[in-house]
Amino acid sequence: MADECFRHPRLAAVYDALDADRGDLDAYLGMAAEFGARSVLDIGCGTGVFALLLAGRGLDVVGVDPAAASLDVARAKPGAARVRWIEGDAAALPPLGADLATMTANVAQAITGPRAWRATLRGAHRALRPGGHLVFETRDPARRAWEQWDREHTHRVVEVPGSGAVESWCRVLDVSGPLVTFRWTYVFAADGEELTSDSTLRFRQRAEVEADLSGEGFELREVRGAPDREGRELVFVARRP
């Protein structure tokens, strides 16, 4: 199930404004060109930022996400008709013959259950053509990123067109092994409404990810650093044989 920040209509509507710096997507655009991809499956496409960037470059794009409110935002954007939007789980996708499948930002880590994660990898494998690539990122657990997920480091107020000022901050609720649960709080100045969204991310060790990829039939080609978070994230590049 998608987190409240993606499935609540009011939060989905302001999501892009609150996460406006998407320089992390440059590396994924570069890899699409590097691998000569003409068709891309964007798993966890959310409000469609990456899918629309790809479609704007003339690629055939399928975006899948379980959050209807986020997909509603995506479908309302200019150029949205060039993308095939699917509400649902990547684990249930049919063969698509895609050249590239991606999970950007927190998507891979947000799939916390081992069964759901393996099912997602199987779905990506099935959706790719032989020789197609799967690319996703995950934070290096050794860097303990969650230690700065507090009000001091995350509090801000953003002026959102059409919505007014939105205040937000984060705090960690629980750390249990590889699972980190945290809560974002949002306050809308226009009417004082306060909404919260709880999320859990799984911080996988590199060896765990490598074993899962191999177990679902992928060849691991390379593990790269994330240009926007050098030394803090691992970018896995795998191939369907």
Image (cartoon, rainbow, N blue to C red):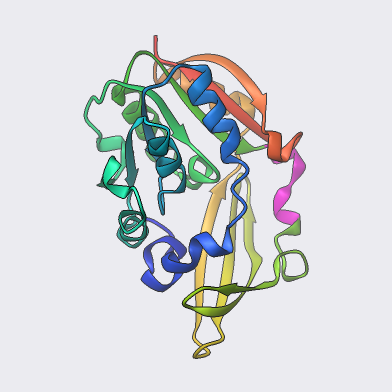
The picture quadrant where one finds residue 8 is: bottom left
Tell me: residue 19, above or below residue 124: below
Residue range (magenta):
140-147
Magenta span includes 144: yes
Q: Residue at x 50, y 19 (%)?
A: 238
Tell me: residue 23, above or below residue 149: above
Nearest the eye: 224 or 34: 34
Position in image of residue 112 (x %, y %): 48, 45
Magenta span includes 138: no
Position in image of residue 216 (x %, y %): 39, 21
> Which image quarter holds the N terminus?
bottom left
Position in image of residue 89 (x %, y %): 30, 43
Position in image of residue 29 (x %, y %): 52, 31
> Which image quarter holds the C terminus?
top left
Q: Residue at x 30, y 59 (%)?
A: 68
Indicate left or right for 141 with 44 as reference: right
Indicate left or right for 223 with 99 as reference: right
Q: Is residue 190 among the parts visible in the rendering?
A: yes
Q: Residue at x 51, y 73 (%)?
A: 161
Q: Is residue 84 among the parts visible in the rendering?
A: no
The picture quadrant where one finds residue 6 is: bottom left
